[in-house]
Image (cartoon, rainbow, N blue to C red):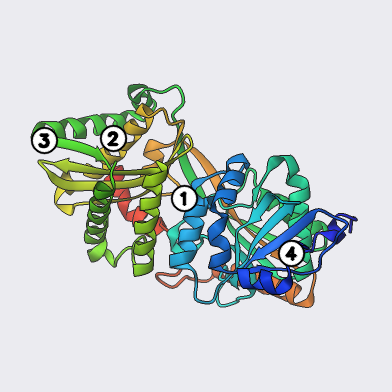
């Protein structure tokens, strides 16, 4: 272990006494007066709450900057959707007083391969809320040292690390895995999802339509003309708090109404998830991120699309449609109009997020892969868990899966959405 690594196991500041730190939710450990590097573990909501400004400043400098790593998204998720058996474990790496890195973790049973479970570090934001592109948040100028500090801290704890929805091409989570592998940890990796996206740079809406397949392009134009001729068509974006409340209720009503006869949806299927989106959408409106649209035909809500603009990207999150307008392809038209609105805003990219539903390939030709990285410490327990996980995965690939088996995500309802957003 390097001299720097041997000193960064400290959690908290030397100036903060142990009783005071524990009372604030920051857990102190060994301290070294020889090194300015410190690693804090934030273990309570009260400790996380005042981090917003620092967190946001760091995220803006990070290569992993994205909506699903914002304080707003993850704090609101923890507030409403945290697992009953989960414990907050956010690690903050500091050099002196400067925040250089965040590992937005919780500790809880890993469910990557039921029924085998191990207590593991996992990203905040998991489960059916459907976060993508999860990662560490690290300042690029000190990335190597910061990730090394986190690797040394995790290595000292010898607990399984289970990281989901990690961008495969580049991430600090991968750098963390490589450092732990050098310390004798073993890794299991697998590609779990892909995120189709549209590059909008240099496009007008008409030039974008010309890049699509001729059948899909013709179908969209035909359906839009039919709606414009047959109805008074309005495509309204939410801009005020009153509009947000109304539009979100429309989205929930349309979404649940459509899937009620299909066994329900796992997008908004619990009171906790609905509470999360009510609070998150209000925060997103305040920040200028919310892109919530309602398509009205003769004044009646026929479809709603819920997304976000973060930096120069549009993130399509979810949609709802009135089944009474199915034959009019309102979902197809709504998706096209949302893409048009993104182009008119000067947005560089339209990301349809994870899921390989066929309708996405009608709109998007590029994809990013997401992977799951599981890290097992060089202990007897770590070796055993890794072997059991591998055996269980082989069994799951070869044996028939029970109906309904699978990890919760936004995928299930979006499969059903396919016929609405890309029907021919």
Tag 1 or tag 2, which sits nearer the N-term? 2
Report the side of 326 relative to 340 (left or right).
left
Looking at the picture, how far across and down is residue 197, in whole percent? 46, 39
Q: Which type of secondary structure does the marked residue at label 2 adopt? A: helix
Report the side of 33 relative to 386 (left or right).
right
Which residue does the image show at 36% across and 46% down from the upper left?
Answer: 285
Question: Mark 3, residues whose alpha carbon is within 10 Å: few (<14), some, or many (≥20)?
Answer: few
In the rendered structure, find residue 354 and report the number of the disc placed on it: 1
Q: CA distance from mark 2 to mark 1?
A: 21 Å
Residue under numbered circle 2: 337
Question: Mark 2, residues whose alpha carbon is within 10 Å: few (<14), some, or many (≥20)?
Answer: some
Tag 3 or tag 2, which sits nearer the N-term? 3
Residue under numbered circle 4: 11
Which residue does the image show at 72% across and 56% down from the upper left?
Answer: 177
Visible residue check, residue 354:
yes
Residue under numbered circle 3: 232
Depth check: 145 or 223 in front? 145
Q: Which type of secondary structure does the marked residue at label 1 adopt? A: loop
Looking at the picture, how far across and down is residue 168, in whole percent? 61, 47
Q: Are marks 3 and 1 in contact (CB under 8 Å)?
A: no
Q: Are marks 1 and 4 in contact (CB under 8 Å)?
A: no
Tag 1 or tag 3, which sits nearer the N-term? 3
Q: Is residue 342 above or below residue 324?
A: above
Q: CA distance from mark 3 to mark 1?
A: 34 Å
Looking at the picture, how far across and down is residue 119, in whole percent? 64, 74
């Amino acid at each position: 272990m390097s001299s720097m690594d041997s000193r960064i196991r400290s959690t908290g500041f030397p100036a903060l006494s142990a009783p005071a730190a524990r009372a604030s939710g920051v857990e102190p450990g060994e301290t070294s007066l020889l090194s300015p590097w410190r690693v804090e573990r934030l273990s309570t909501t009260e400790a996380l709450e005042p981090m917003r400004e620092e967190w946001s400043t760091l995220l803006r400098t990070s290569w992993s900057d994205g909506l699903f790593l914002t304080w707003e998204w993850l704090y609101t998720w923890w507030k409403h959707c945290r697992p009953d058996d989960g414990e907050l474990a956010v690690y903050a790496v500091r050099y002196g007083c400067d925040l250089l890195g965040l590992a937005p973790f919780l500790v809880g049973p890993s469910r990557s391969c039921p029924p085998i479970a191990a207590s593991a570090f996992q990203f905040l934001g998991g489960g059916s809320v459907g976060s993508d592109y999860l990662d560490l948040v690290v300042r690029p100028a000190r990335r190597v040292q910061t990730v090394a500090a986190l690797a040394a801290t995790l290595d000292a704890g010898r607990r399984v690390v289970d990281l989901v929805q990690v961008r495969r091409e580049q991430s600090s989570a991968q750098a963390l895995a490589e450092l732990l592998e050098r310390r004798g940890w073993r890794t299991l990796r697998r590609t779990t999802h892909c995120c189709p996206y549209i590059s909008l740079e240099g496009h007008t809406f008409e030039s974008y339509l010309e890049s699509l397949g001729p059948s899909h392009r013709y179908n969209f134009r035909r359906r839009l003309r039919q709606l414009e001729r047959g109805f008074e068509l309005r495509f309204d974006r939410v801009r005020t708090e009153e509009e947000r409340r109304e539009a979100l209720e429309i989205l929930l009503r349309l979404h649940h109404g459509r899937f009620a006869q299909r066994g329900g949806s796992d997008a908004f299927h619990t009171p906790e998830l609905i509470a999360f989106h009510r609070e998150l959408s209000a925060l997103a409106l305040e920040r200028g991120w919310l892109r919530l649209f309602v398509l009205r035909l003769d004044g009646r809500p026929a479809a709603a699309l819920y997304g976000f603009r973060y930096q120069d990207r549009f993130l399509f999150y979810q949609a709802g449609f009135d089944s009474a307008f199915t034959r009019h392809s309102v979902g197809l038209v709504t998706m096209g109009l949302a893409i048009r609105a993104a182009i008119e805003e000067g947005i560089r990219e339209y990301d349809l997020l994870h899921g390989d539903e066929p309708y996405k390939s009608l709109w998007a030709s590029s994809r990013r892969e997401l992977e799951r990285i599981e890290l097992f410490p060089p202990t007897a327990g770590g070796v055993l868990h890794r072997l059991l996980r591998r055996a269980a995965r082989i069994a799951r690939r070869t044996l028939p899966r029970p109906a309904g088996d699978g990890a919760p995500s936004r995928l299930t309802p979006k499969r059903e959405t396919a016929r609405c957003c890309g029907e021919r």
